[in-house]
Image (cartoon, helix red, strand yellow):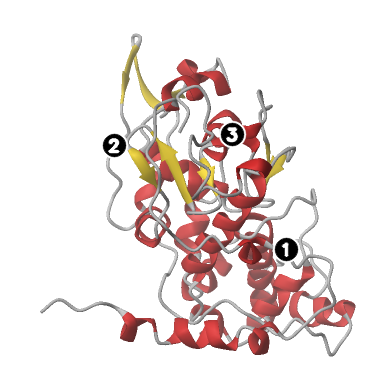
Amino acid sequence: MDPAAPGPLDHSVLTMQANHMSDVSDTETIYTRHPDSAPWAIDARIVLYLQFARLHDFHLIAYGRVDRALVTALVERWRQETHTFHLLVGEATVTLLDVAVLTRLPIEGHAVCIDGRQFESWKDKVHRLLGNFSDLPEGADDATVEKYARAYLFYLIGAVLFSDKIGNWVQLLYLTLLDAPWEVIAGYSWGSAALAYLYRRLCEASRKNVKEIAGPLIILQLWAWEHVLIGQPMRNVGRGAFAPPLLPPPHVPYGSRWSFERRTRTHTRSGVGFYRDLLRANQGISPPCDTETELHNSRKGREPKNWLEINVRHVARWEHMLELLAQAN
């Protein structure tokens, strides 16, 4: 890698450099789409459903301001060919273990894949699953509470976990994931799907002239604070003194240790230049890998299809993942 820019010295492996943002002399700070807070107060009556769906722990750390400058500097170092960041210490990436530890999103379970075809109108589906949404009334029956729980999960999945670059809209397609018994919803491998989606969003954002990024950016930020060790917020303990975050209690996600009041990050006010200066370094050439560009093609805007049928080979491989693990003698 060139010490003055994230681009490679040798293009034999990093074959997508011509379309990479580092090929531009000076990129602007990327706009990040991530909600700072939950859209409404979470009623205690739906917490049990969040816990059963194995998404309550992620709900605890899902929101917060994302550092656009940090994300931009990381995206500049992301390589689509290897799905890794090229950093001072070498190559690094967000792993399934990181997702599991930082967020407690489940990484085991069924592949998050659905039949995108619809056999009823979206209006009817929304009414059946969510009802007429307003404040959850006192004395609501179980069926009503379930609809409110699905409504919040719809937001958590569509606007945070798999957020898109379409402003305040949430794709109704994600509602299909919730059109199932709670046992099925709880059986999804939400963590693996979130990681794959984050990779895709990083690949898209690392291209030339892309100005924004969506996806589970809170996972990326927590990972960077834990592993890249730059721009971390510090606890303001008074009298001009600062201290690192405390370890969290065992019943909450490890990433929640970064959710504390009276914190400061004044050292990052210089913006993306602060991170670029710390990330600049000579980098080695990555080993040979699958650089098939077809993997990065987007299927947006195409007619709904049965993705379970189309991806049957990949889903079957995921369902038998434990059989594919290398075993030590």
Mark 2 sits on what residue? 246
Query: Residue 135, position in %: x, y?
Result: 74, 61
The front one of 10 and 54 is 10
Q: Is residue 314 left or right of residue 103?
A: right
Q: Is residue 35 in view?
A: no
- Mark 1 and mark 3 lie on one chain; the one further toward the N terminus is 3
- Element type at mark 3: helix
Query: Residue 270, position in %: x, y?
Result: 55, 15
Identify the amino acid type marked 3.
Thr
Q: Which residue in the rendered view is the most extreme toward the left? A: 329
Query: Residue at the spot x=32%, y=86% of the render?
Result: 323
- Mark 3 and mark 2 lie on one chain; the one further toward the N terminus is 3
Query: Residue at the spot x=59%, y=34% of the render?
Result: 72
Query: Residue at the spot x=69%, y=27% of the render?
Result: 28
- Element type at mark 1: loop
Give residue 72's mark. Answer: 3
> Is 233 placed above or below 186 here?
above
- Please identify the quarter of the rendering in which residue 253 is found: bottom left
Marks 2,1: beta carbons within 8 A: no
Identify the amino acid type marked 1.
Ser
Mark 1 sits on what residue? 298
Query: Residue 284, position in %: x, y?
Result: 37, 39
